[in-house]
Image (cartoon, helix red, strand yellow):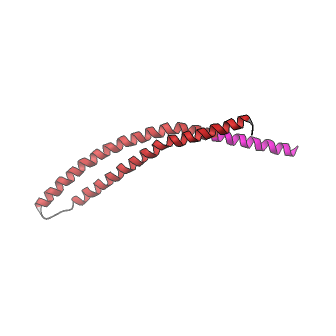
Amino acid sequence: MSAPDKRLAKLQQIASVMADHALAPVAAATAVVRQIEARIADLANHRAKLSVATGDPSIAGTMLAQAERLRIQQAAALTELAAARVRLEMARRTASKAVGRDQALGALADKQIAAAKLEARRRLQR
């Protein structure tokens, strides 16, 4: 392995580690978004259950009040979801730079390997 090949391999290894490190916030932000989405779905499901008709007016009033509180909680969760999605997008943009470097170095290494194989085949044909 020549010196430039060794340097490229080392750079590729470093870029791979950096890409993995850059993707960790994306995974964490994705988990937060999924958690908030699940909470919103639970709130919506609970609200739907409270909208069932009942014959007792006092129970109906209590259920209506609870449904209103859940609606407010759901609206707050939707706001929180929007903020989490913004954080996720920012993490993705940041990670894309590191991942792009890793992919570019991988492509460069593949080209060098292909060129070396082509040169070896040419030598054998001579």
Which x, y percent locates residue 121? 81, 45
Q: Quadrant of residue 88?
A: top left
Residue 83 lies, with reference to residue 45, above or below; the image says above
Number of numbered discs visible in the structure rendering: 0
The picture quadrant where one finds residue 109 is: top right
Q: On the rendered structure, is 67 left or right of 109?
A: left
Q: Which residues are magenta?
A: 106-126
Give the position of the N terminus as an image quadrant: top right
Magenta segment's dominant SS is helix
* Residue depicted at 11% across the width and 60% down the height: 57
In the drawing, does residue 117 fall left or right of residue 83? right
Q: Position of residue 4 (x, y in %)?
A: 71, 34
Which residue is the extreme one toward the bottom? 55
At x 28%, y 54%, the residue is 43
Residue depicted at 21% across the width and 62% down the height:
52
Residue 65 inside the magenta-drawn segment: no
Q: Is residue 35 left or right of residue 66?
A: right
Q: Whole-percent x and y of residue 107?
A: 65, 41
Q: Position of residue 77 (x, y in %)?
A: 30, 46
Residue, x 58% and y 37% (percent of image)?
Answer: 101
